[in-house]
Amino acid sequence: MKHFLNTQDWSRAELDALLAQAAEFKRSKFGDQLRGRTIALVFFNPSLRTRTSFEIGAFQLGGHAVVLAPGKDAWPIEFDLGTVMDGEAEEHIAEVARVLSRYVDLIGVRAFPKFVDWSQDREDRVLKGFARYATVPVINMETITHPCQELAHILALQEHFGTTDLRGKKYVLTWTYHPRPLNTAVANSALTIATRMGMDVTLLCPTPEYVLDERYMEWARRNVAESGGSLQVSHDIESAYRGADVVYAKSWGALPYFGNWGPEKPIRDAHKHFIVDEAKMALTNNGVFSHCLPLRRNVKATDAVMDSPNCIAIHEAENRLHVQKAVMAALAHQ
Amino acid sequence: MKHFLNTQDWSRAELDALLAQAAEFKRSKFGDQLRGRTIALVFFNPSLRTRTSFEIGAFQLGGHAVVLAPGKDAWPIEFDLGTVMDGEAEEHIAEVARVLSRYVDLIGVRAFPKFVDWSQDREDRVLKGFARYATVPVINMETITHPCQELAHILALQEHFGTTDLRGKKYVLTWTYHPRPLNTAVANSALTIATRMGMDVTLLCPTPEYVLDERYMEWARRNVAESGGSLQVSHDIESAYRGADVVYAKSWGALPYFGNWGPEKPIRDAHKHFIVDEAKMALTNNGVFSHCLPLRRNVKATDAVMDSPNCIAIHEAENRLHVQKAVMAALAHQ
Amino acid sequence: MKHFLNTQDWSRAELDALLAQAAEFKRSKFGDQLRGRTIALVFFNPSLRTRTSFEIGAFQLGGHAVVLAPGKDAWPIEFDLGTVMDGEAEEHIAEVARVLSRYVDLIGVRAFPKFVDWSQDREDRVLKGFARYATVPVINMETITHPCQELAHILALQEHFGTTDLRGKKYVLTWTYHPRPLNTAVANSALTIATRMGMDVTLLCPTPEYVLDERYMEWARRNVAESGGSLQVSHDIESAYRGADVVYAKSWGALPYFGNWGPEKPIRDAHKHFIVDEAKMALTNNGVFSHCLPLRRNVKATDAVMDSPNCIAIHEAENRLHVQKAVMAALAHQ
């Protein structure tokens, strides 16, 4: 039984099939691929966009989504084996996942890092716990990666360029300022999928401390080796933007300061000029701009960039609906 | 593309058609007017009645409602253009409304005033922001007016009187006591729709400070000019009730004290006798009583009034379901 | 009109019919018994399992569930008649139940005790208030009893033993330790249904103070008189387990300390050895083990017991879906 935890677990042919099915759903939105089927959407962290697109996607395919949102704080679930559960946790993931699997046909899980200890968070224990004990397929709705966003992003690029072949495009993933240190999930994902698609990828960030976790850097290097394309890290805005076909922006916290964010703030504050603006976009090859949303206007990108015809962020957000329907349909019929 | 923000934006013929369709749905509750369609119900303030009636209404017409409830506190959305979003807001209404519009066919919005500055709240920025940026129709689920309640109320009166023509009825909108200063939305709406229907309307309130915002007083005067009927403000309980055909009760805060409610409390406390009781109802022309609910028994109206056969509050509440189905169906097929 | 408030209100033949229908739904999960019907699930206390199983059950039968979760704290509703509602309550149960009844075909209610005054909580006022004023059938989704769990439990036992006749089985309901004093609902229910089914029932608990409320002890005695079987209370672990066919575990607070839980803690803490472990299960007649979940592993039962093939807790949890579909179908077609 296949889960959808990371695109890296899926073959390129499988990903291409998902993208093709998503494009088909975009042309014709109804289907019966989930007729009578159900999906539990388990949100350990709140969501509006993800929840709406999954819930509506299930409905349009004849299914039904149950939204379980234990609240902003973590649901007290035990993930370790053998523990004497006399603390906060009222239930073990073994029971949670097994019981849910008796009720539903699919389980989606959103679980952000706790931002205290990256060595813990990078284990992705909530998602992996569900995948281990569930007897139905599990979908990653964003944990420390965001594979649904990856597919939506790539579909938007394919639409923009009018081709499914993105090889040779110059792709810039640029860090941007945000008042708080954010999850690296979308950055990890952008790096993963952009290299997978064979693009020439530049990770642009303020300092070496903003380079992503070695797991994702390694995935990217492996992808480059297999798909062609290239990978480089840059701290120089001008050279990174020059000639770019794609600019994808995201803010994230520097991992060396994980859980001890105080000293990161002055570095972050010193790089507000990483904002995506018209001057930078003018350096590109009439580049397309996108972002996963939500986006703080005039902090991450200027109004002019957001309101430009080259901004495809809204299309990418729409594509979440289409790609997730493709993922649900594929997992329900394996 | 037409929204349903206020009844005042709709022609009398259009409103009559909505009411007729609602009456038809009351006789026969299923339909396929929303087959495969979806509506996002965005609740900036909590709701049980509105949420239930919209969600069930969508289901009975073949559609599906997604309930988005960001919590009791305001969802941090930016509504101004050109702002550097380095404060609380994580997203601009332009993106929120545009993305939702890609997922759903209709958007309902509930957003109460913040009760700090009426000059701000009277701009109805959340609702208008959605209407401005959404590319699908927007429905007011109560902001500073409550047009769905208006239609439910009028349908209940039409049923009670056995006629769709309410001209010539003596209609009293009476303020009642409540421990806290409440939203003027339902009062604004009652005044608007009662005058629209050509009734002889009396706004009964403790002092001139409880008169409603000039916008709605002006709408009421315009309606009287167009529909016949009349409008008067009264602070005298006995003359207001005498001969009334309809008594509609609601509590609200006096606008001059908006955001500085302390000095309003003694005025409010001095008018607990505005409670709707049998003695007052005995002055009426066998008048019908209603209220939008929730209602504090023996504070706003006595048990005897609530449990009287002349109380149609439960019918009016039921009618929310029927009129909202009519509104959704009309907006989805324009 | 029949509600489903307690199994004790239903005849044995009716309960058997529900169980048979549930078994049928387990074999074939789709139906149109709720085609176009709706159910409001009113959660005064949070839930994931109950909510998921009811919502999916309604969907699989063609209906739609609306989930109303006013939050962890009690929704301020007035239950007394004649009160001047100038306190916290914004609405009377008479209006809440009547209005909901206009929208939906069924109402489910979850309302736990407040744990302050058992003489109050034992009146089950929320559930009874809904049943009194609603004009549609009401389902108990766990208040001070949990009749849906009862049916799921019995169905799981019938499956395990391969017969619907459970007479003569030795059934042990054992108290177990939990860090906090919990609701007696599932214990009350287990005692009620186990005696109803004619089993030889032992209530095993640390001290006489943990005996259940006299109402449920009386139900159990009446059931024994009518169904055969037997009832005894024991504080001796070894004799209680010896030869048992069924071990059902649950933790609950001792009623004499209700609302004044401090002095109960040392008693509770002194009985952690009530944990269900392999040594105790070895005393049984190859007994089956179950629990309503959630369960703290290695506090209420050991990993070895939970992971044993004789543990049917997951099957019982699954059965919630099937029995609730049977209950909804029966109530919707009476």
Image (spheres, coloured by chain):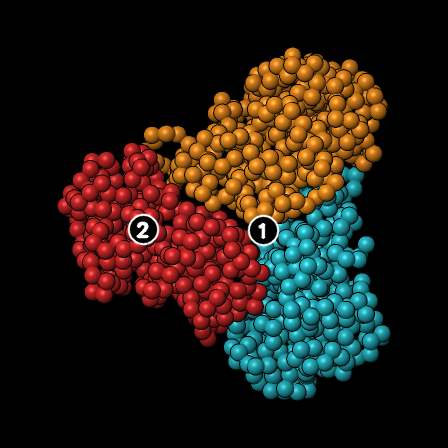
Chain colours: A orange, B cyan, C red
Q: Quadrant of residue A219?
A: top right
Instruction: Give me the chain letter of mark 2.
Output: C
Front residue of this view, candidates A230 and C22: C22
Front residue of this view, candidates A316 and A33: A33
Q: Tag 2: residue type?
A: Gln
Task: Give the residue displayed 51% in from the left and 28% down from the top.
Answer: A124
The residue pinned by badge 1 equals B72
Task: Give the residue displayed 72% in from the left and 50% down from the top.
Answer: B105
Expressed as whole percent of the image width and height from the top left, the position of residue C137 reads: 46, 66
Task: State the SS at label 2.
Answer: helix
Task: Give the residue displayed 66% in from the left and 30% down from the top.
Answer: A17
Check if mark 2's residue and mark 1's residue have beta carbons within 8 Å: no
Q: Quadrant of residue C102?
A: bottom right
A256 lies above or below B230: above
Q: Is residue C184 left or right of residue A183?
A: left
- Is residue A71 among the parts visible in the rendering? no
The residue pinned by badge 2 equals C158
Task: State the SS at label 1.
Answer: loop
Q: Tag 1: residue type?
A: Lys
